[in-house]
Amino acid sequence: MNNIVTVNQVTKTYGGQNEKTYQALKGISFDVQKGEFVGIMGASGSGKTTLLNILSTLDTASSGQVTIDNQEITQLKGNELADFRAKEIGFIFQDFNLLENLTARENIALPLSLQNVPASKINPAVAKIAQRLAITEILDNYPTQISGGQKQRVAAARALVSEPAILFGDEPTGALDSKSARDLLETMDDLNKNDQVSILLVTHDPFSASYCQRILFIKDGVISTQLQRGNQDRPTFYQEILTTLGTFEQ
Amino acid sequence: MLIKLALNGIKSRWKDYLVLFSGLVIASAIFYMFEALATNQNFIKQNTTISAAVIIFQLGSILLAIITLVYILYANSFLMTMRQRTYATYMMLGAKSGKIGQLIFMETLIIGVVATLIGIVVGTGLAYGVGTLLMQRMGGAIHSFQPLYPLAVFITLAFFMVLFLIAAIINRRQLLKQPILKLLHSSNTPTAIKHRPVVWLIEAIVGVLLLATGYWAMVHLGVLGLVLALVTIVLGSYFVFNALAIWVLSLLRNAKLASKGLNKFTIAQLTFRIHDYTRLLSMVSILFALALGAITVGMGYYNQIPLMADNAPDAYDAVVYNPTQAELRTINDLHVKSRSQYTFKTTSGAVYWNRSEFDKDPLLMVDPERSGLGDVTYVKADVAKMANPDTNEYLRLRDILLPDMRQRDSKVVTAAEFNRVGGPSYQVTALKVQNFRNDLPTIKALFNSQAKRFPQIKQDDGSYKYAFYTQLNGLFSGLEFMGFFLGIAFLAMLASCLMFKILSGAANDVQRYRMLRKVGARQKLLHQAIRREVGVLFLLPGILGVIHVLFGLRMFQAIMVQPYYKIWIPFSIFLVLYALYYLITTYLYRNIVLRK
């Protein structure tokens, strides 16, 4: 098996010794293969965000192991964690999280600057990913000067410029209009199919989820159901997701 | 309910209020100290030497009052910006604007009263300490000094209450003028700065020219120049920050180094901030100059006391009559440069001097024609003129007599005649030392011992250098202390203004730093970025302020001997304090933006 992400019996408990504790994740296990496009769905409070925070090393698991690109991330500390985030994972968020005082170009170059990549190598890398995401024209604009869809493309470019092992999306279409959302999802699909970018997408939106090849449904801190798209076309898969969600919510 | 809300408001913004608070406490403490020193009636009556210092302290408190008013208005406007969202929420929930007005009023007043009261307590301690120090230096009696002086308490309270009332009224008006929606959604996004190299270049040149005009006017145009300088320097500082600093940053942004680590982010942050802070930074640079200038001039005056004492008509550092064995030993402790010995005899109507002694070792006197501050020329007295009452020589000879004998006729006679004169004989030892201030304790001991043996010395002690020095010391120690404490008060206010502005923007930076962490910036790099960003914001007005002071000091050349003498001492003291504020700001800012 060629796993890019392996999650094994991960739990997360909030609250200290003398406080009321709450278990957000109750021993969750799954894996993502290289080049796969996986979705994670669940209602709010199901543990989606906790899981994503642990995967992206922003939070630590109470127990269990997480391996990304053959590295056990629960053992990483301090600078190793920061470097791991900069090199191995790309992130796109619902609210873009662009630095509004930097131009699009500077935003995209940031992860490379952080890794002290020489300036002579940064420019071509930015140009290449910008062209791939069709944002070359707006590179010298500030985030306030471009549309939401363009912002998310810039964010995607920033996430991908360091060629990470996996791209995490946290409701990336949440703040976009339907046209921009569709554009972004198609771009992600394209990156996945043609550039073999592995993607893990957290969403509660069935339409976004329908672009995935496999969907994991989280409920009360464990994976309750799994859907495979297989050879279905997207609209059919979308219907299946809706049906599953319907029964899932009961 | 209103009081509860007001107190809650203060509690929730405690850290921000603390900054304002500390600035206010320091301002009111120093104001109180000045007042306590200036109004203590018994103290002033018992120490005549301090009366000059009193005027200086009054002057100091007026200066302080003006700056404090500006500070309070400024600081309060920051607080309002931070609080406006809360107020808007109250209004949206249906609070009447009148009620909000009362709330603001109350918050401002509570802070004001508490800060002033604490300031008075701190000020009492300060006044006691400074009073003791002053008295030690002037050899006066401290026991008549009451550090907690009701009149001073009253003046301080009344003055600050008026200030806060004004601030409260202005706060209230400003907030209620704005529409609720604007208050709720005050935009956090930085405005992108347009790239306008030509405009920047013109602004930068104008700025530098304005500064140069101001510096020139201060030195060459007197009081009128000072007014002109105030205007041009304020404007000049503004342009320099608005154009020069941003222009340099935009150059840096495209430099190769910028693509390393978080440099680009820091430059972008700074560009935005300096653009946004232009007015504040110019004000801070002026305040910085005032503070540093006050400390430097205060200390400078103190340094020049010996130089002024040198300019006294009397050339000798100490004059000793009929020295005892003990006094001779004391003289041996001095670092003597020259030692002359003369003898005189007194009869009921006249004083006789032995001319041969002056022929061998002429009397030294200050040449009034060729002497200025810090540049004293000594000449040898012409023996022939010493007996003529119309000459300077006669007067100087008289000066080394005991005061009660000075009304008698001075006669300079040959050795043979001198030997024939009857009556008591005195020996005068006139001493010059290498460094007056270094030998001061010994000179003081000598003076006191002499004053005990010859009580008449006290009748006209101004003619002895030690006594003259003590009087000058009273005046200039007052100036030094005032300069120093005014400087500290200004510094506290300027630093807290800067702190305020930086901290009030910190909430918007939280998101940015959180994002940088997500993208994989190392913790160390984030800390470094914060240190640099805050550092530059402190450094820029600091550098400009230092330049202001260096030029401004030339203005004092007319009334000070060497305004630049030992300038590193006040500069280092000031910079250490300023650096301390920088460290505190960095710490607070880091805690806000990197909070997990």
Image (spheres, rainbow, N blue to C red):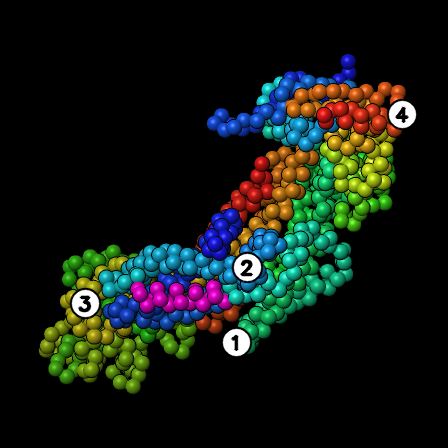
Query: For the C terminus of chain B, which image quadrant?
Result: top right
Is B114 colored magenta in this rendering?
no
- Is any part of residue B361 visible from this angle? no
Please report the bounds of the magenta region as a residue range.
B149-166
From the image, state whether disc 2 or disc 3 is nearer to you.
2
User: Does dot 1 land on a helix, a strand or a loop?
Assistant: helix
Disc 1 crowd, CA 10 A, few/some/many (<14, 14-19, 20+): few
Is B153 colored magenta in this rendering?
yes
Mark 2 or mark 1, earlier in chain: 2
Q: Position of residue B137 (x, y in %)?
A: 30, 61
Mark 2 or mark 3, earlier in chain: 2
Residue highlighted by disc 2: B100
Do marks 4 and 1 both belong to one polypeptide chain? no
Amino acid type for the residue under numbered disc 3: Ala
Residue highlighted by disc 3: B451
From the image, state whether disc 3 or disc 4 is nearer to you.
4
Residue highlighted by disc 4: A233
Amino acid type for the residue under numbered disc 1: Val
